[in-house]
Image (tube, helix red, strand yellow):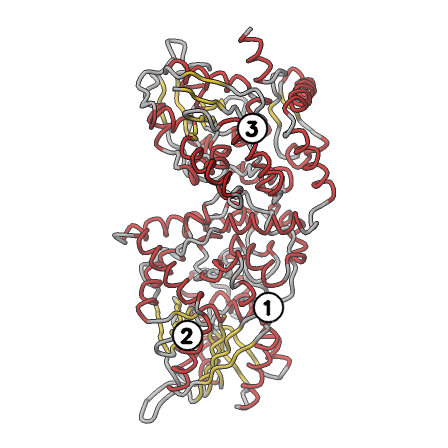
């Protein structure tokens, strides 16, 4: 099966190693993975800021780049949510684009959803050098509420030997990132992040694992600012691929 | 009510720094969020009930004129008078006129957010009519210098018991009490003579029922009974035109959700259905009953993207669950309605230009949509308001320039490769040996409260290309 990997702009720039973990997971599961070179951003920053025109242009660009694959996989719930739930609405005024988007959207998956629900992955590529310790899982907002990502990452993480899940209080509560909100209303955003960090620390886990770069940078940034150098912040792909 | 939404950022900043408020706001998650979570498990088919309530509310909104006519006819048939007000000011004027007509000196009130829109108490005072709040929370706010409510169902959620103890001791001139039942008893003792000496009762209306011409009032204190049945000659209901429900059965459906979503109760302590004034041979009820149905921007939403907002049943679940509201409280929002529903309603009712921060000040986490008993897509509506702002040139110039530059680059892969390549190298340098950026000039909002973990200095696409070679 031919899988198009949409790396996402944040992973491309800020955490390229997560892109490689995703690639490894898909390839060891037997997928033929193609990473279209022309990909950039899904357009979510524009869409969420009310800049519909630019968001729509990127939706069309995404469609052209990815519609020929059997599946499209995205290691991010919020980019996945943008493509799967908001792209169809963005191009609804053009019957041709709308029809093409309607064919594409059901084949677009968030990474853990794809590994769990489509590939029904049993054996993970992580070996003896896998992450070992206790983790707590943060449910990122768009993944959870737009795509229903909750059981999938937990089911996969349960297959990693040596990983023990300790749920934090309110794992589904927003971390305060909110895209450009985190810059426009930085103080409110940081105050919300503080609550999340307190819940993470109270869980006593060695690492917080999550599936979205925005939350990742936000939580890691706040943990370090308040002097927590110990709690690791890991993308679920890194743990599953044994790359951490 | 005067609008202060333009001071959102400043107010929110003060609220974040107020440690006492931060403590008090924790009640939202410990009481309301967990209360709702357990209460909704009592329903066999919570989702189905939500769908039914949504459908019944929309049935009313989509034929609002018809149901209002039906309501008016039925209310008239039972001896009540129905008046319409186009604006909040007109509504206040109508209530004042009713008070004058019946030579009212003292009015007692239940909690009503519509009366806050109308600034009704000030209008009555100006006309020489004393208005007394009888909902305990609203009473506390009134004796504290007419403070504004910070929540639509728990108006004093921002205060703690100690603050109220001090207030009671000062205003009531009695020994300071700290036991809640004793404090409540004191408030009852102070309010009782007011109930007995009032000429007019003013209530809100959670709903008005078209088929019977009734008003439905939901409280936990029973003060609505005291305001309507006990002494007053006149009962005036003030509520929004969108609050009409076609049938009692619709009301029953919605009531399965309202208290559960609001306070986590299966049913509120009191639910009153009041129909018409006292009839011949009846023992109690007012001599005269009026309905003042307020438009004040509501009909303007019909037929627009924001029509869905009109089915709101004012439970407050969206604010209870909102991470932003939980941190800044209701006063930051600057008008009658706070939280996600307020961030849609305020711009809609008082003008987007007067509330520019409200649609923006949300993480769009989506929890408000998840918990809304009538499934209002609040995040979508907030996003649509952002579109209106963006398209209406209501955002700062810097934002347009940033998006113009960003979109120019993201549509051009070669240019994108080049600029991200440079950006990640600069950020790596800024991150230094600790691999984190402590201050970024164009993202101060971020770095004031957080580090920015630095990137490793090469993009995925570069590394991928190298690897494939």
Few, some or many residues within 10 Å of mark 1 (<14, 14–19, 20+): few
Please, which chain is the residue tagged with disc 2 on? Answer: B
Pair 3/2: label in front = 3
Q: Nearer the viewer, residue B96 or A103?
A: A103
At 53% from the left and 73% from the top, the residue drawn is B294
For marks 1 and 3, give the CA distance.
Answer: 44 Å
- Label number found at residue B16: none
SS for dot 1: loop
Residue B409 coordinates in the image, percent (x, y): 67, 29
**B284 up-or-down from B122: above or below:** below
Marks 1/3 in contact by CB < 8 Å: the verdict is: no
- Residue carrying label 2: B224
- Residue carrying label 1: B146
**A23 up-or-down from B279: above or below:** above
Q: Is residue A168 left or right of residue B467?
A: left
SS for dot 3: helix
SS for dot 2: helix
Marks 3 and 2 share the same chain? no
For marks 3 and 2, give the CA distance.
Answer: 51 Å
At 42% from the left and 16% from the top, the residue drawn is A32
């Amino acid at each position: 099966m031919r899988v198009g990997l949409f790396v996402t702009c944040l992973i491309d720039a800020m955490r390229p190693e997560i892109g490689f973990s995703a690639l490894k997971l898909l390839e060891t599961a037997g997928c033929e993975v193609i990473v279209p070179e022309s990909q950039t951003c899904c357009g979510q920053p524009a869409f969420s800021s009310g800049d519909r025109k630019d968001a729509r242009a990127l939706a069309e660009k995404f469609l052209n780049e990815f519609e020929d694959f059997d599946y499209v996989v995205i290691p991010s719930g919020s980019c996945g949510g943008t493509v799967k739930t908001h792209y169809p609405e963005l191009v609804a005024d053009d019957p041709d684009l709308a029809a093409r988007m309607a064919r594409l959207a059901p084949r677009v998956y968030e990474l853990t959803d794809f590994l769990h629900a489509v590939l029904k992955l049993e054996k993970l590529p992580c070996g003896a050098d896998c992450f070992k310790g206790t983790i707590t899982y943060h449910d990122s907002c768009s993944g959870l509420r737009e795509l229903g990502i909750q059981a999938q990452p937990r089911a996969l993480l349960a297959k990693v030997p040596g990983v023990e899940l300790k749920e934090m209080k309110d794992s589904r509560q927003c971390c305060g990132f909110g895209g450009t909100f985190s810059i426009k209303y930085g103080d409110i955003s940081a105050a919300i992040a503080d609550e999340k960090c307190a819940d993470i620390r109270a869980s006593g886990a060695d690492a917080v694992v999550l599936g979205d770069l925005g939350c990742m940078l936000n939580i890691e940034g706040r943990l370090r600012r308040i002097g927590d150098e110990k709690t690791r912040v890991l993308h679920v792909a890194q743990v599953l691929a044994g790359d951490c | 009510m005067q609008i202060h939404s333009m001071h959102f950022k400043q107010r929110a900043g003060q609220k974040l720094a107020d440690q006492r408020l931060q403590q008090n706001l924790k009640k939202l998650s410990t009481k309301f969020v967990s209360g709702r979570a357990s209460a909704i498990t009592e329903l066999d088919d919570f989702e189905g009930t939500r769908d039914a309530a949504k459908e019944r509310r929309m049935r009313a909104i989509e034929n609002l004129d018809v149901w209002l006519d039906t309501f008016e006819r039925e209310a008239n048939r039972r001896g009540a008078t129905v008046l319409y007000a186009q604006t909040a000011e007109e509504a206040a004027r109508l209530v004042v006129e009713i008070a004058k007509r019946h030579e009212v000196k003292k009015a007692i009130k239940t909690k009503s957010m519509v009366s806050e829109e109308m600034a009704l108490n000030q209008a009555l005072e100006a006309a020489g009519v004393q208005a007394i709040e009888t909902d305990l929370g609203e009473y506390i706010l009134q004796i504290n210098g007419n403070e504004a409510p910070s929540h639509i169902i728990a108006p004093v959620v921002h205060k703690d018991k100690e603050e109220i103890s001090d207030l009671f001791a000062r205003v009531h001139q009695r020994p300071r009490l700290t036991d809640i039942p004793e404090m409540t008893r004191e408030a009852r003792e102070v309010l009782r003579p007011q109930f007995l000496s009032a000429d007019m009762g003013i209530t809100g209306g959670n709903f008005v029922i078209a088929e019977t011409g009734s008003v439905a009032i939901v409280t936990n204190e029973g003060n609505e009974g005291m305001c309507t049945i006990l002494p007053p000659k006149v009962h005036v209901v003030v509520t929004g035109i969108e609050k009409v429900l076609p049938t009692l059965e619709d009301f029953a459906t919605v009531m399965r959700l309202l208290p559960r979503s609001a306070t986590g109760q299966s049913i509120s302590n009191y639910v009153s259905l009041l129909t018409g004034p006292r009839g011949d041979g009846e023992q109690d009820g007012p001599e005269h009953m009026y309905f003042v149905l307020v438009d004040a921007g509501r009909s303007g939403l019909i037929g627009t993207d924001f029509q869905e907002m009109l089915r709101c049943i004012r439970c407050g679940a969206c604010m209870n669950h909102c991470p932003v509201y939980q941190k800044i409280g209701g006063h930051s929002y600057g008008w009658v309605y706070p939280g996600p529903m307020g961030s849609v309603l305020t711009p809609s009712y008082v003008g987007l230009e007067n509330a520019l921060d409200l649609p923006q000040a949300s993480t769009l986490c989506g929890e408000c949509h998840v918990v809304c008993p009538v499934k209002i897509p609040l995040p979508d509506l907030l996003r649509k308001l952002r579109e209106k702002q963006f398209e209406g040139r209501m955002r700062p110039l810097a934002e347009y320039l940033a998006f113009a530059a960003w979109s120019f680059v993201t549509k051009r892969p070669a240019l994108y490769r080049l600029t991200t390549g440079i950006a990640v190298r600069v950020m790596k340098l800024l991150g230094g040996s600790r691999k984190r950026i402590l201050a970024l000039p164009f993202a101060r909002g971020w770095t004031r409260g957080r580090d920015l973990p630095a990137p490793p200095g090469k993009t995925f696409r570069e590394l991928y290309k190298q690897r494939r070679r």
